[in-house]
Amino acid sequence: MHGLDLTHTWAGWLALAIFVIAYYLIATEEQYEINKAKPALFAGTSMFMVIGIYYALNGLNPDPLHEEMVKLVEEIAEIYFFLFVAMTYIETLIERGVFDALKFKLVSKGYSYKKLFWLTGLLAFFISPVADNLTTALILSTVLFTIDKTNREFLVAGAINIVVAANAGGAWSPFGDITTLMAWTAGKGEFADFLFLFVPAFSGWVLTAWLLSRYVPKGEPHFDAATEFKPVFKEGGMAVVWLGAFTIFIAVMGHQFFHFPAMWGMMFGLSLLKLYSYRLNRRSAEGFDIFLSMKKVENDTLLFFFGILSAVGALHYLGYLRYVHHLYDLVGATAANIGVGFISAIIDNVPVMSAILKASPQMGIDQWLLVTMTAGIGGSLISFGSAAGVGVMGRMRGIYTFGSHLRLAWTVLAGYILSLLLWYLQFEVMGLY
C-alpha cells in the first residue's frame, strides 16, 4: 500500500462524490432508464483518473498507483472471465434446449408456483456450495424465467429467493463464495470449520423463503398437454451439461491443489466446449456456433462488475476502506462483523472482505466464521450487493431490479437476523469453539 491517506484531499472528496452519484443512478435504474453498467463504468474509470491527476499536480511518484491498478485488474479479471465462461455455457445450454426441457418436466408435473418457488430455492442452496453462488444463481434464474416470462410477482419473489439461497448456500462451503474462498485460502479456518455455518445459513434462508412465499401468486403455470410439445435436447445437449459440470470441478480443484485462479479452470473448460462444438459440427447437421453463444452474453453485466469493482478499488486506494478497520476498535469484533454484512451489501463483499483480511484483526475462529457468513449473506440485502444478485439482474433485466428487491428486502433482513442468533447460540452459548 502507498501509505498515503487521500480521504481529506480534493481528489478524495471528488472521487467519493462520483461514487455516490453513480451509486444513486445505479439504484434508480428504473426511474432514469439508464443501464446500471454506464454509471458504474464511468465511476470506476474516472475515479482513478482523478487520483492520477492529483498525483501529477503534486509531483508524486505514480509507481504505487500503477502497481495498485495492475493488482486490481488481476482481481477483476478473475471475476470477469469466470462470469464470461459461466454465461457462455448458459447461453449454449439455452440454445441446445436444455432449459426448455427442464421447464417442460417441471411444469408438466403440475407443480404450483409455490412448489416451483421452493424447489428452485432448495436447488440453489444445495448446488451453490459446489458450483459457487454466482453460477448457481445464473442457471436457476434462467430456469425460473423459462417457466413463466410474464408472471412478474412469481419472477421477482423467485429471483430474490434464488439469490438469497445461493448466497446462504455458498456461505458454508470454502468454495461456495468468493469471500469464503478468500478466508479459507488465508488460513482463517479449515475446510470442516465452515460446515458449522450450515445451520445458521440454512435456517436464515428458510425464514426468508417462507416470508417471500406469501408474495408468490396462487395457481400454476399454463400447461396444455394437447398443445404443448415435449421439447427434446438437441444433439450434444447432455454433453454440454457434463462439460459444464466438469469445468466447475476443474476450476475448484485447480484452485485447491495448484492455487490457480478459479477463472483459469473456467477458461480451460471454455476451450473444451469450443473443441466439442468443432467436433459436433464436423459430424452432425445439428451442431452449434460457440461464438454465437458468446455473442449473446450480457456484456452490460460484465462491464458493471468491472466498473463497480474498479470504483471500490479506488475507494480502497484513497483510504476510505480503512474506516472499516476502525469498526473493530470502536465496537468490538462481534458488532463489527455484524456491521460488515450491511457494509458489504452497499459496497461489495469482496473488497470489504479483502480489507478485513489485510487488517487481520485478532479474532478466534468463531469470529472469522461470523464475518465470513455476514459478508456472504449480507450481500443479499441489496440486489447488487453480491455477484449472484448482479448476475440475476442481468439475466432478468427489467424484472429483478434494485427497486423490486428493495421492496421485499425486509424478508432478507429477517433471515439475516435469525442466522446471527443461531451463530450466537452455537458459538457463544454452546461454546463450539
Image (cartoon, rainbow, N blue to C red):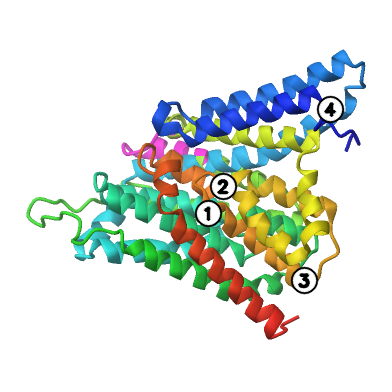
Q: Which mark is residue 355?
A: none
Tell me the kind of residue under disc 4.
Answer: Leu
Q: Is residue 427 above or below residue 152?
A: below
Residue 374 in which image quadrant:
bottom right
Residue in the image at 71% along x and 45% along y? 351
**Mark toward the start of the polypeptide (2 vs 1):** 1
Query: Where residue 65 is drawn, which disc sits there?
Result: 4
State the SS at label 4: helix
Farthest-out residue, bottom: 430
Above-or-below relation of 214 to 273: below
Q: Secondary structure at mark 1?
A: helix
Q: Is residue 233 visible?
A: no
- Residue 365: numbered disc: 3
Start-end of magenta stretch:
274-290
Location of residue 172 (image quadrant):
bottom right
- As rendered, which of 25 and 88 lies closer to the eye? 25
User: Mark 1: which amino acid?
Assistant: Ser
| Labels 4 and 3 touching (C-beta < 8 A) | no
User: Which circle marks residue 380 in the picture?
Assistant: 1
Q: Earlier in the sequence, mark 2 or mark 3?
A: 3
Report the predominant secondary structure element of the magenta stretch.
helix
